[in-house]
Image: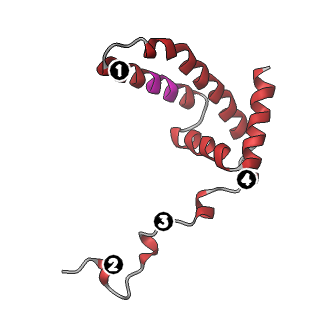
Amino acid sequence: MAAPIDRPDADISSIAPPSNSALRPDTNNIPSEKVTQFVNVYLQVVALIERREGELQATETESESLRIQRDIETAAIALIETAGLTRQEYLQLLSLANVDPEFGEQVATLIQETAS
């Protein structure tokens, strides 16, 4: 039996990746509270990574390094969820800040204001 995609009348929209614009939400629709939550937890996650960086670099085995990486990830997820964001929301906002110049500037400004 042929795969469904081999049919000339197959609807490939269900398997085709969404367009780039569909991946990027309109940054004007992101509530300022979400952006503030993101910035606050981003700073906490960065501080966590910086605190554990020396410990991670001092590991002697790959298994020890992986254990510490998992510990850091678990702690970061706990920080994110405690801040009121899901892991997915955090990662989406982080990605958006890196690919959308306007949103990235907004986040960078808020980081500077919050950190000082």
- Res 67 label: 1
Q: Secondary structure at mark 3?
A: loop
Which quadrant of the figure has residue 32? top right
Q: Secondary structure at mark 2?
A: helix
**How far apart are the alpha carbons under marks 3 and 4?**
23 Å
User: Going 65% across and 44% down the picture, which residue do you hit?
Assistant: 98
The reply to whether residue 32 is visible in this rendering is no
| Magenta region, residue range | 72-78
Labels 3 and 4 touching (C-beta < 8 A): no
Q: Is residue 103 above or below residue 25?
A: above
Lower position in the chain sequence, tag 3 or tag 4? 3
Residue beneath disc 4: 29
Query: Local crowd at mark 3 within 10 Å, few (<14), some, or many (≥20)?
Result: few
- Disc 4 marks a residue whose amino acid type is Asn
Q: Secondary structure at mark 1?
A: helix
Lower position in the chain sequence, tag 4 or tag 1? 4
Lower position in the chain sequence, tag 2 or tag 1? 2
User: Going 78% across and 27% down the picture, which residue do you hit?
Assistant: 112
Which quadrant of the figure has residue 94? top right
Q: Is residue 74 magenta?
A: yes
**How far apart are the alpha carbons under marks 1 and 3?**
34 Å
- Disc 1 marks a residue whose amino acid type is Arg
Query: Local crowd at mark 4 within 10 Å, few (<14), some, or many (≥20)?
Result: few
**How far apart are the alpha carbons under marks 2 and 1?**
43 Å
Query: Local crowd at mark 2 within 10 Å, few (<14), some, or many (≥20)?
Result: few
Residue beneath disc 2: 5
Residue nearest the viewer, comparing 80 with 109? 109
Labels 1 and 3 touching (C-beta < 8 A): no
Lower position in the chain sequence, tag 2 or tag 3? 2
Residue beneath disc 3: 17
**How far apart are the alpha carbons under marks 2 and 3?**
14 Å
